[in-house]
Structure formats: structure tokens, C-alpha cells
Amino acid sequence: MDMMQLPAANQDSNQALSLETYRKWIDQIENQPAWRYKSDREMDYVDGNQLDSEILALMKANGIPPAIESIIGPAIKAVLGFEAKTRTDWRVTADGVDDESKDVAEALNYKLNQAERASGADRACSEAFKPQLCVGVGWVEVSKNSNPFEYPYRCTAIHRNEIFWDMLAKKDDLSDARYLIRKQWVDVIVAKEWFPGQEDLINVAMGRTTELDILADGGAMTSLMQSIDDQRGWSVEEQQWRDAERDRVCLHEVWYRRWVRATVLRSPDGRVVELDRNNPAHGVLMAAGMVRAESALIPKVRVSFWMGPHKLHDGPTPYRHYHFPYVPFWGEREDRTGVPYGVVRGMMYQQDNVNSTISKIRWGLAATRTIRTEGALAYDDDIYRRQASRIDADIVLDAEHMAKPGATFKVERDFQLNEQQYKMLQDSRMAIERSSGISASFQGQRGNATSGLQESTQIEQSTQSLADLMDNFRAARTQVGELLLAMIIDDLGGRQNETVTIEGNVLKPDRTVVLNTPTTDPLTRMTVMTNDVQRTRLKVALSDVPSTPSFRSQQLSAMSEAFKSMPQQHQVVALPHLLSLMDIPNKDEIIEAIRKASEQQTPEQIQEAMDGAVQDALRASDREIRLKELELKYNPDRMQAEIAKIVSETVKNGVQSAFAAMQAGGVIAQNPTISPVADVVMQQAGWRPPSPVGQDPNYPQPAGATPSPAPDVRENTSPQLPPVPQQADSGAMRGIEGG
């Protein structure tokens, strides 16, 4: 607990923790089952400290070499690695379906995942998972950080021997527990800094200030005299709460609940808040009938600090949630007593068999048995025993004795006994796997599987045996996320126009969400908040997709196989998502380049765009023609100018056409066979045959001029040209004047 975050002490004697109640809870803790020593011993086996001093002394006296083959340690490490590989992220979801709730949920989801990384939540949960697996319980503290130079929230793993809880509670989250106590040894100078104004009381507790000193100062400190009387009647041993030699004291951080009757407001959407009479919005909502007031029995969480029988602080919780700031990670608990235990309990005895068997085998390999008659040695027995224990033993026999009939000296070894012990060793190793459910294949070792399918089956069976444990771990980790989210909402609730920038990636751009934006309600004319973090109903869930690199590799492999079977147009869309799963340098730049390339138009898209542009141009030209017609209709001067412009352009075009026709006539005169082609070109260009023949309507005639009659040409006098047809519009070789 961060002492600088404590609220002001509450002087309400009805809610403050009394010395009698505190002493009763301490007595209950002292009478709880003695499971902590057993759990410490189980953790020793995990750490490899499996032979205590008594066993080592006995083995040394019998000449047995100590030996340890830790099977528990690698099995526990395999499960811890499994948790690290399957770790998931938190995801904040909203109960509502409106866009406002989704925006708030997305913004808080980004803040929560940021807090997950910065507060050390993943590390703390993993550290709590180890005692949860081994001895049945682990603890994580979720609190605010008073250091302004660090992240405002922190998650810390707490040792199990520091936490004492109400073992009569039934719920896993301890929401029905009466109390939770944390014992923490600190220096006296630190205790004085944490509780300013209590220096005199701490000096009294440490024996630095006596009753005579208080009376000599005037005897006005009645509270100190009461503390001295409480200390006299305190039944707890002195060494449990103070250490004068080391200048330390044991502080008891007591979190407890007071069940009180209060008025709550229930909205139609199911939201429930406690009535705050100092909040004018609550009064307006009640007067408008938008909420319903109800009486309910609710828990009030408080915190108190004690140093033996001396109370240093008592006041309400500094957090808005209704939970203790310590989250339990449960393994297994005994049905009758509620004592926690883990997987190591069932592995210890078989581990002892393994160690003792290895020691005996080693002793048997080196042990010898001597059969001799008395007097066979040339020196006394003590010297012989020292020589026999040596590798380079030199034994001298008595030659006179060995010459007698019946004299014997033999050295024997019992290999049959060692073989039986080796079988027992193998059985003990297999028994550890059976009792824990953690197979050798799960640990990455070669077991007794004869095929890959059998090995996969054994791994799956080990995973199933840990399913209940992992389910408890996910529930506890979710509670850690809920406490973090509650603190984030509490801090954001008092800020207006809080801007949260959600960082994106190459696949999703950055997004900005503004929280707690004040607006005016058109019905009540009151200032309300849009994107209000305190009004939106939220919940914390664990994402179904693990966030570990190993799982991303599995996703990459599966998506690569699916990518191969996709159509080409779908591969273009899926390729950036496939690259996002790869851990390669400059990944973002590569994905961005692929996205830009995929955004280029295909030939079909280009043709479609051209067709659309043509249609737009035609519609625009039609509108322009109509506008010109209207303008000419209502503007006579402009109409006359346009007529003159058209006449001028017509004359110009006619002259140019006539000149071109003359040139074409010369070419046709040189090559008469191209005249049909020329007629087709002229007609496609818009030329129409004159009527009567010889008058071209596209070529203007001067005023008063009459067309000259066509000459009566019947015969061509040029020897270089063929004869002219008698009828201009008949025959297969009709010329440019033809119809």
C-alpha cells in the first residue's frame, strides 16, 4: 500500500476498527491450520532444496553420498513456460450498442493495454502464477503509485506469507471476506515518515517513551496513556510486532468491510450508483423520474494500520471499487478446511524416493562386503576399514594365518540389489508424471511415446490436466484488469475534454477519441457529458487471441497455407495482413508499399472511369448548349453576333473544303481508281451531294450569282486519261460529283 495515497482518517467510531475486533481477527489467524510451513517446504522442493540438514547428517553417518535428481523443478518450469506462451491481452467491451459506448470502450481499451505494459501487470501475474501452481495461492497488489516520476499505477506480486485473509469467505475474489491483513516489517524511521504525527506513539511502542516520561511532560497526552494500557493487555508476543535490536516494527495493513444501509439510484438501463446528496445531477434525475431510489445493504471498504495494539490510521478506501487491492490467484483448496495446495504436494514423496534410490544405487556401486576369518589381516580393523574405502586400497594379509586350513578372505559386490533399485527408480519417475499430470513430452523431453501421434496425445492430456488451474489464473488476471480499469476511470472522470489518441498501424490509421465532452441536454437544460467514462457500462474480458510471438508464428503458418488457396484478387487484400504477422525489419514500410501498389487501378477500372468521364462531359455539353439557347433567346444582340460568327465560320470552312476538294480532285485526276474511296471518306466526314448537281450547299455563293451550267463534256481529249462517263451518277466508276 502506498502510504501517500491514504485518505484522511474517518472519525466515525461506528465504522472505525476497534481494538477488540482487531484482537479477535488476530486470534482467528493464529488458530488457522498450519499450512504455511508445508507450503514453504514444497517451494524448497521446487528450488532444489530437497535434503534438509537432518537427512544429510544421517546419510553422512551411514556413508551414503547425497544425491538429488530434481524432477519437480523442470516440470514446474514447463508449466510456467506454457503460461508465458499462451498469455493474452485485456479487452474492454461495452454493454451498450451505441457508437458513444463503443468509442469510450475503445479509448479505455487502449488506456488499459497501455497500463498493462507500464504497470508491470504481466510480470506480476506470472510471478503470482508460480506459487499458485506450486502451493495453491499467489497474490498481486494493484495500487496507485505516489512517485510522480513513474507510471501512476503499479502491479506487484506479494509473498503469500505476508497475506492473511478471512478463511470463512466462500468467493474466490474475497468479495464476502470480512478482512484481509498484510504484515510488513519496516524500519522505525520509515514508519514515522509514513505516519506523520504518530512519532510519539511509535516511540511509546518501541519503549523509547515510558509512562514516567509522559507524566513528566505534563500528563496531557491521554491517547498515549491509553496506548500504554492497551499494550499491557496485548496478548500477542512482543517479537511478532517489534524488534528493538534491529529497530524495526511490523505494520499490519488491515482491509475490512462494513455493511451499511444506503440509498442507491437505479436507471432504466440497469446502471446503479450510490446517491450523492452533494451532486445536483442526482437530485434532478430523481425529480424528473428518470431514476428510481432504492434502499440497499452495500459494503464499505476501509483500511486501518496497526503496530501491535496501537492504531496508526483508520479511514475509507482510496479507491472507487468495492474490492480489496490484493487479488488472490487460487490453485486448489481443501474442501474441509479451505487450505490451499498445489501440484507439488503429490510430487514430494515420489521425489524423495527418486533421491534416496539414487543415493542407495551410488552407495551400492561403491559398497563392498568382506568375508574373512579372524586374524587374516596383518594390521587392526580400523586401518583395514580406512584402506577398504579407498579406490587404491592396499590390503596386507597375514601370511601365517592364511596358511592355516580354513583361512578365508573374500570381497563381494551385490549387483542384483542395484538392478532392483534401478527398477524402483524408474517407477518413481513415472509416478511423478502420473501424480502431477505433466508428462515428459509436455516438458520438451523424450518420454515413452513411440510415435508422433502418441506424443501429441500426451501433450494434449497434460494441457487438459492444467485446464482448471489455468481457468483460475485467467479469472484472477481478469480481476487485476478490472481493478486497473477502475483506477483509470476514476482518474479520467474528473477531466473534461480528455483526448485519447489510439495508435494505429499500417493497416489501421491513428484515431482520436475525446472523452467527457460537456454538452447541454435539450430536455433538462443541464450540462451533461458525452463519452462519459463514468456512465458507460464496461467490462473487462481476456482476448481470445494470445499475444505471444510463438502464437503469432503459428498464426503466420496457418494463414500462409490459407493464402496459397486464395484467388489472386483476394491475395492482394490479404497480403498486408499476412506480413503483419512476420517479425521482419522495415515491416511497416513494406506493408505501406504493398498497399499503395494495390490501390492502383486495373485496366477495367480505368476503362470504367473513362466511360464515366465521357458521360459527364456529354451531360455538361448538353447543359452548355441549353444555356446558350436560353441566352440567345433573351439577348437579341448576342444572337445576331452569334449568327454572324456562324456565317463567318461557315464561309471559312467552305473555302477550306473547296481548297481541299481541289487538291483531292488533282489526286483523283492522276489516279481515277481511288474516286470510290474518296466518296466514302467524304460521306463519313459529313459531306452530302449537291442538289441540283454542280451546286454545293456547303460552299456559299456570292449574292446575285447564278450557277453556271455544267459544260457538256462528252469526250476526253487527253490521251493520258480515260474517257469521261456519259452519265455522272451511273456506272461502277462514278466520280466525286456522283450521288
Image (tube, grey):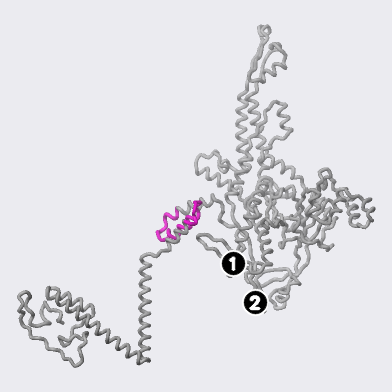
Going from the N terminus, do you reach mark 2 or mark 1 first? Answer: 1
Q: Is residue 640 above or below residue 101?
A: below
> Looking at the image, which is closer to me, 389 or 221?
221
The residue labelled by disc 1 is 513
Q: The C terminus lies in which quarter of the figure?
A: bottom left
- x and y percent of residue 244 in the render? 84, 45
- Is residue 334 visible in the rendered image? The answer is no
The residue labelled by disc 2 is 520
**Magenta stretch, main secondary structure class:** helix
Q: Of the residues shown, which amino acid type is indicated by label 2?
A: Thr
Q: Of the residues shown, which amino acid type is indicated by label 1?
A: Val
Q: Residue at x 40, y 59 (%)?
A: 567
Q: Is residue 582 magenta?
A: yes
- x and y percent of residue 65 in the render? 67, 28
Q: Residue at x 72, y 61 (%)?
A: 319
- Horizontal arrangement in the rendering, residue 77 relative to residue 19 (left or right): left
- x and y percent of residue 543 in the render? 58, 57
Q: Is residue 499 above or below residue 196?
A: below
> Looking at the image, which is closer to me, 646 or 424?
646
Read off the magenta span.
561-589
Q: CA distance from mark 2 to mark 1?
A: 19 Å
- Horizontal arrangement in the rendering, residue 722 relative to residue 359 (left or right): left
- Horizontal arrangement in the rendering, residue 654 relative to residue 339 (left or right): left
Q: Is residue 665 above or below residue 559?
A: below
Q: Quadrant of residue 43?
A: top right
Q: Quadrant of residue 13?
A: bottom right
- Horizontal arrangement in the rendering, residue 588 relative to residue 55 (left or right): left
Q: Secondary structure at mark 1?
A: strand
